Amino acid sequence: MVKKITTSKRDREKLKEQKRKEKQQRKEERQSSGPSSFEDMIAYVDQFGVLHSVPQERIEEEVDASHIEVSVPKQENVEVAPHMGRIEYFNAAKGYGFVKDTDNGEKYFFHISSAPATIAEGDRVTFEIERGMRGMNAVRISVVTE
């Protein structure tokens, strides 16, 4: 059970006046302590990001600019192994379908532009995977002939 404390208008006004006086007193104490100088307000940061009240000696380390790489390093001789799969669904009228990977059972979307014209449901295929706008897509699809 919660008790409701009621106060009169006079009590609320007294409380406001008391808070006003306390605030004024704190202001006067701040002013009586003397003005603070700009130098007292400055903080210095060292090379590790630690704040100090006085400047610290900087230890500078020379960096060889020839070792800095500005772009993504080239991937040399990276061979992407093609995935094996089977065409689960294909709609020639709409121009898309899905390939099911035989290794992990994942299904990947493909567009007719990434597949041969003779592709059909049930065909065994090899394909590569690339990230598309909505997830991973099968690309460079070719039908496996045995």
Image (cartoon, rainbow, N blue to C red):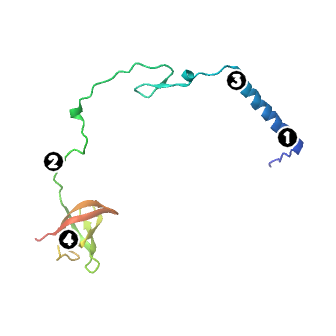
Q: Which element carries disc 3, helix, strand or loop?
A: helix
Q: Which element carries disc 1, helix, strand or loop?
A: helix
Mark nearer the viewer, 1 or 2 = 1
Of callouts 1 and 2, the N-terminal one? 1
Q: Percent position (x, y) of residue 28?
A: 74, 25
Q: Percent position (x, y) of residue 21?
A: 80, 31
Seen from the viewer's position, the closer of residues 108 and 146 is 108
Residue positioned most to the bottom: 93
Seen from the viewer's position, the closer of residues 143 and 52 is 52
Of callouts 3 and 2, the N-terminal one? 3
- Disc 4: which residue: 115
Question: Whole-Å distance between the Cαs marked 1 and 2?
Answer: 79 Å
Question: Whole-Å distance between the Cαs marked 3 and 2?
Answer: 70 Å
Query: Tag on residue 76?
Result: 2
Q: Quadrant of residue 40?
A: top right
Question: Whole-Å distance between the Cαs marked 3 and 1?
Answer: 27 Å
Q: Disc 4 residue type?
A: Ala
Of callouts 4 and 3, the N-terminal one? 3
Q: Quadrant of residue 60?
A: top left
Q: Disc 2 residue type?
A: Glu
Q: Residue at x 18, y 68 (%)?
A: 125
- Disc 3: which residue: 31
Q: Residue at x 25, y 41 (%)?
A: 70
Of callouts 4 and 2, the N-terminal one? 2
User: Badge 4: how crowded within 10 Å, few (<14), some, or many (20+)?
Assistant: many
User: Badge 1: how crowded within 10 Å, few (<14), some, or many (20+)?
Assistant: few
Seen from the viewer's position, the closer of residues 26 and 81 is 26
Question: Whole-Å distance between the Cαs marked 4 and 1?
Answer: 82 Å
- Disc 1: which residue: 13
